[in-house]
Image (spheres, rainbow, N blue to C red):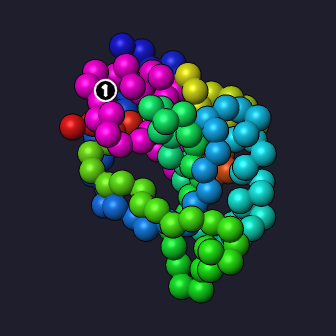
Amino acid sequence: MAFSALNAPPARIERADVAVVERTTADDLPSIQALWPWFEGLVGLRGRKMFARVDERAGTYTVCTPVRDGDRPAELGLATGVLPGGSYLRGHLTGEPPGIYARIGDAMAELQAAAIVTDATRPLVEFYRRRDHVELWVPVP
C-alpha cells in the first residue's frame, strides 16, 4: 500500500496516559479553527506540547496540553482530562502551515485503513510536534 498522504510508512508505538488541560468543541472545521487560536492564546505555546483528541463516536474534537505546575484550568475555563495511553499506529506529516493542516483528514483516514483493526474505545490523536510536523496516532489493540 502506498502512503501518499503520509511522509513515511506508519509504525507502532506505546504511550502512557498523560494528564491534560483541555477544551472540547464539535468535530467540524469552523469550530476547530476557532478553538486552536483561543486555546493557544490562553495557555501559551512556550514549553508546551500540543495535542488534539478526536472522538469519532461523540463527534468531538478536544485540544489539550499536558498539565504543568502553575496551571489553573478552572480559572481559565478549561477542563482536565487524560490523553489515553496504549498502543497506537503512528504516521508523520511534514510541511508548512496551513497546507499541512489540510492534509490531516486524508492522512488520518489512510492511517486508519493501514491499521486494519482499531480500538474504538480510544480517540484518534494529533500531536503537534512543531508548526511543520504533526504526528497522527490511531489506537490499535
* Tally of numbered discs: 1
Is residue 9 depicted above or below 40 in this figure?
A: above
- Amino acid type at mark 1: Ala
Q: Where is residue 97 drawn, in percent x and y?
A: 74, 40
Is residue 123 one of those drawn in magenta? yes
Which quadrant of the structure image shows residue 117?
top left
What are the residue bounds of the magenta stretch? 107-128
Is residue 88 one of those drawn in magenta? no
What residue appears at the point 38 percent right and 36 percent down from the top-left corner? 138
Residue position for label 1? 115
What residue appears at the point 36 percent right and 13 percent down from the top-left corner? 1
Which quadrant is home to the C terminus?
top left
Q: Residue furthest bottom?
A: 70
Which quadrant of the structure image shows residue 27?
top right
Q: Residues within 10 Å of mark 1 (few under 14, many from 20)?
A: many
In the shown orientation, is residue 126 left or right of residue 19? right
Q: Where is residue 47 drawn, in percent x and y?
A: 61, 72
